[in-house]
Image (cartoon, rainbow, N blue to C red):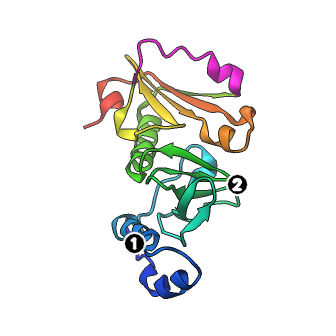
Amino acid sequence: MRLPAADIRRHRDVWIEHGVPAAQIDRAQAFQDSWGGLALPPAPFYEGGSRMLDAGCPEEASAQGWSFGAGACRVSMAYGFMIGPEGAFGIGAGCWTPLHAGVIGWVESLALAAHARRWAKTVTRITGEDAVGRLDLDGYEPVPEVRGLSDNWWRGRNSLIAVYRAEAIALDAPQCLEAHVYDGLDDWGLRGG
């Protein structure tokens, strides 16, 4: 569903006065034109993710370059959702941690999670660095549509596995590492349409 999105062009002069380069404002505006107002289904991790995609004011992290907010969180969080210097979708929690190589990867990941939850016979949640590290991904192939960086999906013979690493990395909290295993999928469940 697409909702009316704020026009961030009205902030341009003020942002430039505060030292935001015009190129970074243009980047945020391009994101807003493409994705602004897109209402998203809840994410199975990251406390449900962002409610709607919406560009925020670009900000510079000295070592990491320019990023901008990608939409308000559904609940109060220790981090926010951001578009990073190279266009990746990720979280900012004092440091930048990319989840997917682009916002399309995040959207595809949300769609895949909703699809897998609907069709899987069982869903198993695995938490913690040790338990997730024991997952055997032999015979699985990465799902390229999600453009995974710290987070990724794998497709097997009759299952899908999602691994959520970004929160554990960003917060230096290995106990936050989590995987979801969607078992009992037929070809429709594995690939859809």
Residue to which mark 1 is pinned = 26
Residue to which mark 2 is pinned = 94
**Considering depth in this image, is 49 or 119 the residue closer to the camera?**
49
Element type at marker 1? helix
Residue 96 x, y percent position in the rendering: 61, 50
**Quadrant of the frame with the C terminus:** top left
Compared to residue 27, the image places residue 95 above or below, namely: above
Mark 2 residue crowding within 10 angstroms, few (<14) / some (14–19) / many (20+): few
Residue 9 x, y percent position in the rendering: 42, 83
Q: Residue 132 falls in which quadrant of the image?
A: top right
Which residues lie in the magenta part?
128-141
Q: Residue at x 67, y 60 (%)?
A: 75
Compared to residue 93, the image places residue 28 above or below, namely: below
Compared to residue 132, the image places residue 83 above or below, namely: below
The first of marks 2 and 1 along the sequence is 1
Q: Is residue 179 magenta?
A: no
